[in-house]
Image (spheres, grey):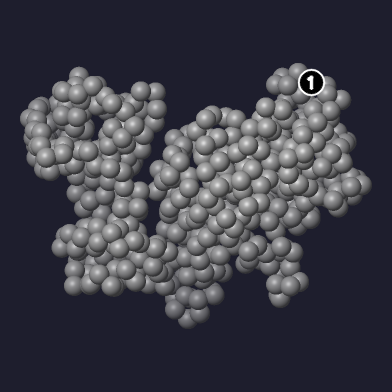
Amino acid sequence: MNDTNQRKIVIFDTTLRDGEQSPGASMNLAEKMEVAHALVELGVDVIEAGFPIASPGDFQSVCEIARAVRGAVICGLARCRNADIDRAWEAVKDAQRPRIHVFLATSAIHREHKLKMDKDEIVRRAVDGVKRAAGYCSDIEFSPEDAARTETDFLCEVVQAAIDAGATTVNIPDTVGYATPMQMKSVIEMLRRRVPNICRAVISVHCHNDLGLAVANSLAAVQAGAGQVECTINGIGERAGNCSLEEIVMALRTRGDYYHANTKINSRRLVPTSRMVAGITGIQVQRNKAVVGQNAFAHEAGIHQDGMLKERTTYEIMRPEDVGFAMTDLVLGKHSGRAALADRAKALGYELTGEQLDVVFADFKVLADKKKDVYDGDIASLIEQQIHAVAEQWTLQSYRVTSGTGLIPEISLTLRHGDKEHNTKMASGDGPIDAVLLAIEEITGINVDCKDFNVHSVTVGQDAQGEVRVQVEYGGRLYRGRGISTDSIEASAKAFLNAINRIAAVSRPSGGIGRRSGFKIP
């Protein structure tokens, strides 16, 4: 179908606000800026940059994004409270196109148990909040929180009042993932039918995935006339997450014949953006994740493979290259040059500086000596490791560990700190990885509590690289670490040191040999 005959759906990305609320997914300012610029490259219409009143850090990040990022509306979230709204405006005022997003719960359960307000007070607060925001800028979004569980008559009343007060977008959130597609469709149709001023605002939806229906509910809303979908990269967010941006975008594109709607998203940036957000947040994408998962375009069944060889469309409804996967996977070996690596990196969606390319190329040569074949996944991991590198105060020089069934591991470890090497020999732990990590604690004097430890294969085969991700707690804060190697124990040591270096970058822990914390792999 010709694009001119399709409705344009606004993509409102809340990865930096709702997505960051995923446990362990918090980002620093530099990481948020990187994500924001990537979202612009992706073609996102609106970026919800944060909740400015939540913390000084959130306020600063929204301010910096508003000042530096061009090409998308920059939005700040606020409750229907004067202080929230004033703070949100202060944060987004320097944006090329600022938006204030105000919200207030409307469902009976929220009115009674959270807000202790009656319906009249809710309407008054909503109107006052929208009016105050509209005094600052013309782009105002209002969300009746928990709209999916709000009585329909009252929902219509609140939405109408908010539009009269100046709301230009009204968002209908399924805050707890309770709705079903038919219900969401009927709610949007009801608002379009019963709210007399609804034509003055864009109808939006914000669906959570508690029942696995976030994308389905969002599609049902679009079918009913919604013009904006709120979503996140990889579907990250509180609890079970949000509507997945890549899934909603490709569903609308692939089934344009049915929904008669599309977006301006550059779909070839979906996989690179997905990988970047996964690398920054430490939340790995499941292999069978739709659109961007490692298996999304894999065909193993003989019948499928036979069909694919005869005609691709027998078993593929999308082309892998259209979402950012490379046409081929096996690309480079130890004889490949710097130019070939740079070309492959660009094909995978990465723009490397000369300095970054030098480091990645050096790492690539080391890897190519260990592996016969280097796959796209290997190259992406090397690049991600460099892009998200942290200043290395501590580096791994060497290790040797002996271990066996029923034996306490014996470990000899050498780390470098500046120009000095530090060594330890000890017998401790309940396995070789535990022993290595305890030895690192012994040398660095930084004792942490491990909250998560995950290891997976980057590609395939016996010589595949292992990628280890850890999350540790130190001083009441969570820190992530990541390491890759064909040696899983070495990858574990690198991941743990990566987290230690992040701690060292923002802390001044006591020097010297530290007390061992009894670190255990969960």
> In the image shown, does 45 or 57 lie closer to the viewer?
57
- Give the x, y percent position of residue 302: 42, 70
Q: Is residue 85 above or below residue 457?
A: above
Q: Where does the image place residue 36, in percent across and percent down from the top left?
A: 52, 50
**Residue 214: in sight, yes or no?**
no
Q: Is residue 284 left or right of residue 447?
A: right
Instruction: Tell whether 126 sits left or right of 173.
Output: right
x and y percent of residue 393 in the render?
Answer: 22, 38
Q: Determine whether 342 is above or below 185 in the image.
A: below
Q: Residues within 10 Å of mark 1 (few under 14, many from 20)?
A: some
The image shows residue 165 at horizontal and vertical percentages of: 84, 39
Compared with residue 331, is residue 432 higher up or lower down, i.e. above or below?
Answer: above
Pick the residue in front: 451 or 84. Answer: 84
Residue underneath mark 1: 117
Q: Quadrant of residue 491?
A: top left
Q: Nearer the viewer, residue 41 or 419?
A: 419
Which residue is rendered at x = 10% and y = 27% of the image? Answer: 427
Residue at the spot 31% in from the left edge and 35% down from the top edge: 505
Q: Is residue 9 visible?
A: yes
Q: Secondary structure at mark 1?
A: loop
What's the residue type where badge 1 is placed? Met
Q: Is residue 504 left or right of residue 397?
A: right
Q: Quadrant of residue 86?
A: top right
